[in-house]
Image (cartoon, rainbow, N blue to C red):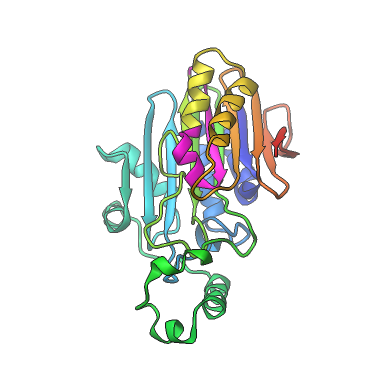
């Protein structure tokens, strides 16, 4: 067994480890772990502790994937439900669809038994109001939200200068490889924006025969380069983790126009080797790793940094 998660997974990593030690499947364990992150205010880019869109509304993206069946489920721009990853699991298990978004995702969640809940953290609301006052003219502020939102994308960002997600990857005792991801996306994003977290092949992909990959940070880049699937396809063709990472990085490096930024690749192969690569992210990147020989998950610096 092996479990991998990015640093944002701190509130849930011990929960996922305990679940695996107790005999849970990998997917069950990582969904429990991600759910804990979603309800923690320590993770400021995920779930209840995350940041709202330009209108001050919380919109969550999440996904799961079962590498045995190559089945996935995802939600995007989900409102009114904090545990988006649990809803994504329901989409995979109980819906013929792969992705549900917006009001349709909320309706599905409510019909599946998820109760409406408060999703906007008080500090996030305070920061949003502060950002509006700092970036809008007096006229725009007076008429908000009846303004041209397309004139405000310069606001999109994060008070902590991080555009992050929580990602968990696992190979369990049955040799099934699975992934789970969740995020509130960019702070002050345009309503309806989707990152890579709910897009199969971009922000996540798992195939138990060869491995899995999941991405964090600037999702627009991972979408354009189909980064997660690039990694897993390379592994399937016999490449090492480092060679697979190089192929994905080469594709990301080709992107020289549009919105640019950094991407972090988290990778795990069918032999339980792992690799985390920081591609052009300015901050220090760390991740959690656990296997049965460790009493608890340990925190490591990114294995490779590409400027």
In x, y percent, where is residue 127? 57, 73
> Which residue is painted at 57% across and 51% down in the image?
164
> Which residue, as the protein is rendered here, is positioned at the far top?
238
> Residue visible at 45% across and 65% down?
53
Classify the position of the N terminus by image quarter: top right
Indicate the position of residue 209 as horizontal and vertical percent values.
48, 17
Asked if residue 226 lies in the magenta stretch, the reply is yes
In the depicted structure, whether residue 196 falls above or below residue 137: above
Any part of residue 187 in sight: yes
Q: Residue at x 37, y 48 (%)?
A: 75
Residue at figure coordinates x 43%, y 82% from the top left = 140
Q: Which residues are magenta?
A: 209-227
Give residue 96's quadrant in the image.
top left
Question: Could you tell whether 6 is left or right of 121 in the image?
Answer: right
Rendered location of residue 258, percent (x, y): 49, 48
Q: Which of 173/303 is in front?
A: 303
Please determine whether, in this image, residue 207 is positioned above or below residue 7: above
x, y (%) of residue 213?
53, 31
> Relative to the observer, which residue lies in front, 272 or 250?
250
The quarter in which the C terminus is drawn is: top right
- Left or right of 145 on screen, residue 243: right
**Is residue 24 visible to the viewer in this orientation of the structure?**
no
């Amino acid at each position: 067994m092996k479990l991998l998660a990015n640093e944002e997974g701190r509130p849930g990593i011990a929960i996922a480890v305990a679940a695996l030690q107790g005999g849970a499947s990998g997917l069950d364990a990582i969904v429990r772990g991600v759910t804990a992150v979603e309800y923690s205010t320590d993770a400021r880019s995920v779930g209840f502790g995350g940041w709202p869109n330009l209108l001050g509304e919380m919109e969550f993206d999440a996904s799961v994937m079962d590498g045995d069946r190559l089945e996935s489920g995802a939600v995007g721009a989900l409102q009114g439900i904090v545990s988006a990853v649990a809803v994504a699991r329901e989409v995979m298990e109980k819906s013929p669809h792969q992705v549900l978004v917006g009001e349709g995702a909320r309706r599905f969640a409510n019909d599946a038994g998820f109760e409406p809940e408060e999703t906007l953290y008080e500090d996030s609301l305070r920061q949003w109001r502060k950002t509006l006052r700092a970036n809008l003219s007096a006229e725009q502020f007076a008429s908000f939200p009846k303004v041209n939102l397309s004139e405000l994308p310069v606001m999109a960002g994060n008070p902590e200068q991080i555009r992050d997600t929580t990602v968990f990857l696992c190979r369990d005792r049955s040799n099934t490889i699975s992934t789970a991801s969740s995020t509130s996306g960019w702070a002050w994003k345009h309503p309806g924006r989707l990152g890579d977290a709910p897009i199969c092949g971009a922000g996540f992909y798992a195939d138990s025969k060869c491995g899995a990959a999941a991405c964090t940070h600037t999702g627009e880049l991972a979408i354009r380069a189909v980064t997660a699937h690039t990694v897993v396809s390379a592994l399937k063709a016999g490449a090492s983790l480092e060679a697979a990472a190089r192929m994905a990085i080469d594709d990301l490096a080709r992107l020289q126009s549009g919105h640019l930024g950094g991407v972090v690749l988290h990778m795990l192969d069918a032999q339980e080797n792992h690799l985390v690569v920081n591609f052009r992210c300015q901050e220090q990147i760390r991740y959690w790793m656990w296997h049965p020989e460790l009493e608890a998950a340990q925190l490591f610096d990114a294995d490779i940094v590409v400027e």
